[in-house]
Amino acid sequence: MNYAVALVPGDGIGPEVVLQATAVLDALGDRYGHVFNYVELEAGGKALDTAGEPLPKSALEAARQCDALLLGAVGGPQWDTLPGHLRPEQALLGLRAGLGVFANLRPASLLPQLRAACPLKDEVLIAGNPTGQAGFDLLIVRELTGGLYFGKRGRNNDNTVAFDTETYSRQEIERVLRTAYRAAMTRGKKLCVVDKANVLESSRLWREVAAIVSEDYPAVETSYMYVDNCAMQLIRAPGRFDVIVTSNLFGDILSDEASVLTGSIGMLPSASLGSPDDPAAKHGHPMGIYEPIHGSAPDIAGKDIANPLGAILSGALMLRYSFGLEKEAAAVEAAVNSVLDAGLRTRDIAGLNAPSIENPERIVGTRDMGDAVLKALEM
Ligand code: NAD
């Protein structure tokens, strides 16, 4: 099968890590009989330098023609003094709006090879974990285009009062819930709706809609939790969660909390998905923007030391969610796991576990880490 992948390498370490991600996708394609046709686009700082705007219309139009978009990172100090509408980050907002993505998926799991990166004690990691092991493997699905960040806001005439509004329609809630249920079906089949329904009317609407949508997914066990309790449970028993679905504001906060439990920012992928029913969706799967959660890391750009695993794992999410290639996605994840097992570390994830005698830790650069994942895929 042929897939068109829009590619925004972006700024700073973006191009370095995206290069490794596409190399892994190509190797996987050779092995499983898929072809990934890349359409490279300029957006972010690079587009500001060449076209004078962070997201040229032509780039967005070209992205819309593709099946999915893989992005490195945008931004850097050289563009920091530009006015708001000319900041590289505007490209991200424009791409999200233009591609109709509304659900942000952030997986967070504790890899045993990086155990020491997690500040939690073993007993906390075992509590509530159905595997009985010290660890967790959860997915936070955050509503991305509604709620408090997009609601009516303002100040009164004498500037003594300010307000922001949390507004959600049934349709906005339903589509993100369905995305979360579909994800839960590919995982542990547990979904926790996180809200503040004891106080907020919008949260009560979330519960009403969830009660209806849940009937379409009888195989998934649905539960509800207040956000303040969820913030505590994430550091008291993270292993009890499979998929968490929540609003824009709560998801913003909880996904950062969860990422701190996993160690390096360089390891974590993300996906932002639209609806499989959208006309832009191809292959019966949603259009998605896939990117590591880290930024452009200008402090380490061009030094061949950035961790490419977050970008490589973002490629795996693209295979899973936009192309429905679960086996291939799992193969990439297994390859990453095996290079970590073999002791390979980029600098940011070095020294996080007691060295193993069979596989002593070996510090490698961006390219060598990518090559090691390629080799592991071939085995
Ligand atoms: P950052 O994520 O770029 O860097 C934070 C720290 O983590 C730095 O010390 C960096 O060296 C390190 N780091 C990040 N990714 C790494 C990797 N793959 N391997 C090893 N170390 C890594 O965050 P920042 O410094 O706050 O932002 C830098 C620029 O990136 C800013 O212009 C910001 O606006 C932009 N940014 C872009 C995105 C995006 O494109 N989605 C997200 C966040 C920040």
Image (cartoon, rainbow, N blue to C red):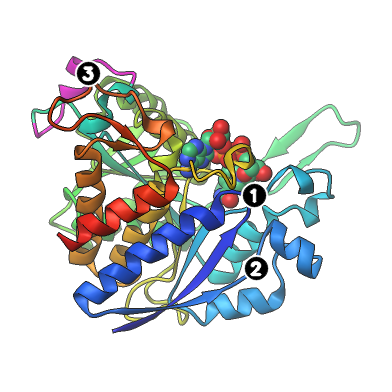
Question: Marks 3 and 1, how far apart in space?
Answer: 37 Å
Looking at the image, tell me whether mark 1 or mark 2 is earlier in sequence order.
Answer: 2
User: Which residue does the image show at 43% across and 77% down from the upper left?
Assistant: 67
User: Which residue does the image show at 29% across and 21% down from the upper left?
Assistant: 116
Q: Is residue 237 above or below residue 37?
A: above
* Magenta highlight range: 119-131
Q: What is the three-letter code of the residue carrying label 1?
A: Gly
User: How many numbered discs?
Assistant: 3
Q: Is residue 243 above or below residue 176?
A: above
Q: What residue did someone put label 3 on?
A: 124
Comparing labels 1 and 2, the label whose residue is closer to the camera:
2
In the image, taking residue 265 as reference, residue 373 lies left or right, namely left
State the residue in front, 318 or 352: 352
Inspect the magenta stretch and tell me whether residue 122 lies in it: yes
State the residue in front, 140 or 259: 259
Q: Determine the secondary structure under disc 2.
A: loop
Q: Determine the secondary structure under disc 1.
A: loop
Comparing labels 3 and 1, the label whose residue is closer to the camera:
3
Q: What residue did someone put label 1 on?
A: 151
Image x and y of residue 234, in percent: 32, 27
In the image, taking residue 151 as reference, residue 171 lies left or right, namely left
Quadrant of ligand 1 in image: top right
Q: Determine the secondary structure under disc 3.
A: helix
